[in-house]
Image: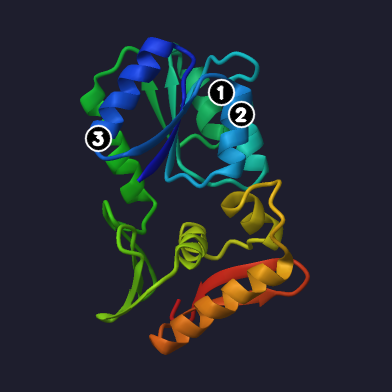
Amino acid sequence: MKLLLVEDERELSEALFQILTNNKYSVDAVYDGEDGLDYALTGVYDVIVLDTMLPKLNGLSLLKQLRKSGISTPVIMLTAKSQIEDRVRGLDLGADDYLTKPFATEELLARLRSITRRKGNVVNDNILTYGDISLNLDTYDLDVNNENIRLTLKEFEIIKYFMERPKCVVSKDDLITKLWGFDSEVEYNNIEVYISFIRKKLTYLKSNVSIVTIRGVGYRMEDSIV
């Protein structure tokens, strides 16, 4: 699983980075709110661990901008403040959980496991599911009823992005920015080709899941059984 850690206390950040990587998380660590926002908007993460008090852009403002931009990645807030009103404000802005400093690393790891379970589509650390499809995050295999097919790296990244946002409309610009980078020279027709490849593989596997076109807007992953 890939995490974004936004924490300005260098010693704490380095300690958390070591603990998380030792527990098989892939971690990007940044030290201020502006970098945190940039990474969160341009990267693809399973969870964001976000400090409240940050230089350049505080954690709550960062969170507000993420949710306004349509980023639904689960966020665990780290805070030195224990007042109820501070937690309520963060939760109202879209935080998924809170940890008050100082905290035990075992509790952070437990909350990370819990928050990924609450997303509703993580079977274990390396399997993502939606409808009748399962995606192996290690091997890039797409499975439907014990029939599977190997995806290319970019097909894997695209379908994973959709599976983490089922029923959400995703624009071509979203895909380009998140998966290639905002300065990429990838064009819309490249996206269309990849979507076509993925659709053919879903059809080959006889899946109930499809990626439908929302004309003039983008795409959405749907399950015909739901």
User: Label 2 amino acid?
Assistant: Leu
The CA span between labels 3 and 2 is: 24 Å
Q: Report which residue position mark 3 lands on.
A: 110
Residue at the image point whose x is 54% and y is 44% from the top = 43
Tag of residue 13: none
Question: Does residue 183 sit above or below 188 in this rendering?
Answer: above
Q: Position of residue 106 (x, y in %)?
A: 21, 27
User: Label 3 amino acid?
Assistant: Ala
Q: Looking at the image, which is closer to me, 104 or 25? A: 25
Q: Give the structural element (helix, strand or loop) at label 2.
A: helix
The CA span between labels 1 and 3 is: 22 Å
State if disc 2 and disc 1 touch (CB < 8 Å): yes
Q: Report which residue position mark 1 lands on.
A: 59
Which tag, 1 or 3, sits closer to the chain's start? 1
Residue 226: quadrant of the picture: bottom left
Task: Give the crowd class for mark 3: few <14, some 14-19, many >=20 residues within 10 Å.
Answer: few
Task: Give the crowd class for mark 2: few <14, some 14-19, many >=20 residues within 10 Å.
Answer: many
Question: Does residue 15 sit above or below 1 in this rendering?
Answer: above
Q: Looking at the image, which is closer to me, 213 or 117? A: 213
Residue at the image point whose x is 29% and y is 17% from the top = 103
Q: Position of residue 146 (x, y in %)?
A: 24, 80
Residue 61: quadrant of the picture: top right
Q: Position of residue 165 (x, y in %)?
A: 51, 58
Q: Position of residue 159 (x, y in %)?
A: 48, 66
Left or right: 199 with respect to 16?
right
Q: Report which residue position mark 2 lands on.
A: 62
Residue 37: quadrant of the picture: top right
Q: Which residue in the rendered view is the most extreme toward the right?
A: 216
Residue at the image point whose x is 42% and y is 21% from the top = 78
Residue 78 visible here: yes
